Amino acid sequence: MAERELPAPYALTARELQVVTLLAAGASNPRIADALVVSRRTVSTHVEHILAKLGVASRAEAAALATREGLRLIQPDSF
């Protein structure tokens, strides 16, 4: 059996998948920044890219799509 890496859906990066997972869990940008140890501006940029890649206009739409299509990563209980 061979193993190969598949591209992420919607061309999301690994970091964007982390951000969308936390976003879908209801985390604010400051909370996401703290959890991922990055700046709030970096999170804001990631969110902008996520919205564009998913073709949605809001965080709520991104969260719904991520949940519906299984884009969320497994995460610890506390983020």
Image: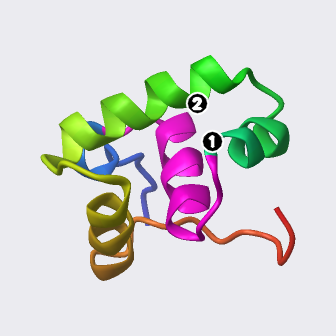
Q: Amino acid at mark 1?
A: Asn
The image shows residue 3 at horizontal and vertical percentages of 46, 55
Magenta run includes residue 66: no
Q: Which mark is residue 43?
A: 2
Q: Is residue 53 left or right of residue 14?
A: left
Taking the spot 60% from the left edge, 18% from the top edge, the residue there is 41
Quarter of the image for the C terminus: give it.
bottom right
- The magenta span reads 12-28
Vertical side of 45 occupied by 2: above or below: below
Taking the spot 73% from the left edge, 39% from the top edge, the residue there is 30
The image shows residue 53 at horizontal and vertical percentages of 21, 38
Vertical side of 5 occupied by 61: above or below: below
Taking the spot 35% from the left edge, 65% from the top edge, the residue there is 60
- In the picture of the structure, the residue carrying the numbered disc 1 is 29
Indicate the quadrant where residue 64 lies.
bottom left
Count neighbours of disc 2 (C-alpha within 10 A) and say few if under 14, some if 14 to 19, many if 20 or more: many
